[in-house]
């Protein structure tokens, strides 16, 4: 007659499995986040190539703002989002093979079914001359970034951070932690999308 496991032996086995899981799961999540960061950077690089090809053919980058002709989606504040970019890069000339290129890190603070999913796109000339009149940031920003800037919310899934100033300019840095504050940017002049001389993140 074979002897079965005793309760103590079963508890030991369960404890060992729990310890192994506690070690393996965080490592798996870390690897998954790193993979997503690599995916975002590759997607931004592909979009950057497409934007530059569009600019060569049209002598301008895709528009950021919406005239209302194409029914482009808007964010929760009513501002046009990257639908204009996708339209310009996929129709009538396909500068990108996948017109549904979404950010794998979706912004947790937004409520629109559109603006939670797409990369941020800034046509810097439009922002400097039409949307904003401040001379303290946007015209210099055009010099920093070039004609365009693309962004992802990053692993923390938030462009800004409550109680902090200059938080939207914070660059994601994995040395601060795999899931840490910061956005993933890419611009025409800066492969990391950073703003030279930008103020540091300030939190109370």
Image: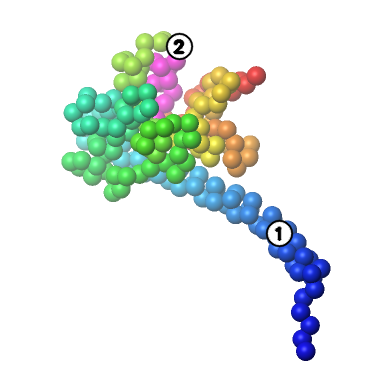
Whether residue 36 is visible: yes
- Kindly report which numbered mark, 1 or 2, lies closer to the viewer in this rendering: 1
- Residue 107: where, in percent of width, then height? 46, 35
Q: Is residue 72 magenta?
A: no
Please tell me which residue is depicted at 35% across the width and 20% down the height of the picture: 127
Instruction: State the residue in front, 105 or 125.
Output: 105
**How far is the residue under mark 1 from the one under mark 2?**
55 Å
Q: State the residue position of label 1.
A: 18
Q: State the residue position of label 2.
A: 136
Q: Is residue 143 magenta?
A: yes
Residue 76, numbered circle: none
Q: Secondary structure at mark 1?
A: helix
- Residue 77: where, in percent of width, then height? 37, 23
Q: Residue furthest bottom?
A: 1
Rendered view: 88 above or below 133: below
Rendered view: 2 above or below 198: below
**Disc 1 vs disc 2: Cβ atoms closer than 8 Å?**
no
Please tell me which residue is depicted at 59% across the width and 36% down the height of the picture: 180
Please tell me which residue is depicted at 70% across the width and 63% down the height of the picture: 17
Q: How is the image coloured?
A: rainbow
Instruction: State the residue in front, 158 or 168.
Output: 158
Q: Quadrant of residue 177?
A: top right
In the rendered structure, the answer to whether residue 126 lies left or right of residue 165 reads left
Please tell me which residue is depicted at 24% across the width and 37% down the height of the picture: 87
Q: Earlier in the sequence, mark 1 or mark 2?
A: 1
Badge 1: residue crowd in 10 Å (few <14, some 14–19, many ≥20): few
First to last magenta residue range:
136-149
- Residue 104: where, in percent of width, then height? 44, 44
């Amino acid at each position: 007659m074979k002897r079965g496991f005793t309760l103590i032996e079963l508890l030991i086995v369960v404890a060992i499995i729990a310890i192994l899981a506690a070690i393996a799961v965080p490592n798996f999540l870390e690897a998954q986040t790193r993979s997503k960061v690599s995916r975002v950077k590759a997607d931004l690089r592909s979009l950057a190539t497409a934007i530059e090809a569009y600019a060569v053919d049209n002598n301008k980058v895709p528009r950021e703002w919406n005239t209302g002709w194409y029914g482009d989606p808007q964010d929760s504040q009513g501002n046009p989002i990257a639908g204009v970019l996708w339209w310009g890069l996929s129709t009538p000339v396909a500068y990108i093979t996948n017109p549904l290129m979404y950010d794998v890190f979706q912004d947790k603070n937004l409520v629109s079914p559109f603006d939670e999913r797409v990369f941020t796109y800034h046509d810097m000339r439009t922002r400097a001359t039409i949307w904003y009149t401040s001379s303290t940031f946007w015209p210099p920003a055009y010099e920093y970034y070039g004609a365009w800037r693309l962004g992802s919310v990053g692993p923390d899934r938030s462009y800004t951070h409550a109680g902090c100033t200059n938080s939207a300019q914070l660059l994601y840095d994995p040395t601060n932690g795999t899931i840490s504050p910061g956005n993933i940017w890419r611009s025409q002049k800066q492969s990391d999308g950073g703003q030279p001389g930008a103020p540091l993140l300030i939190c109370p």
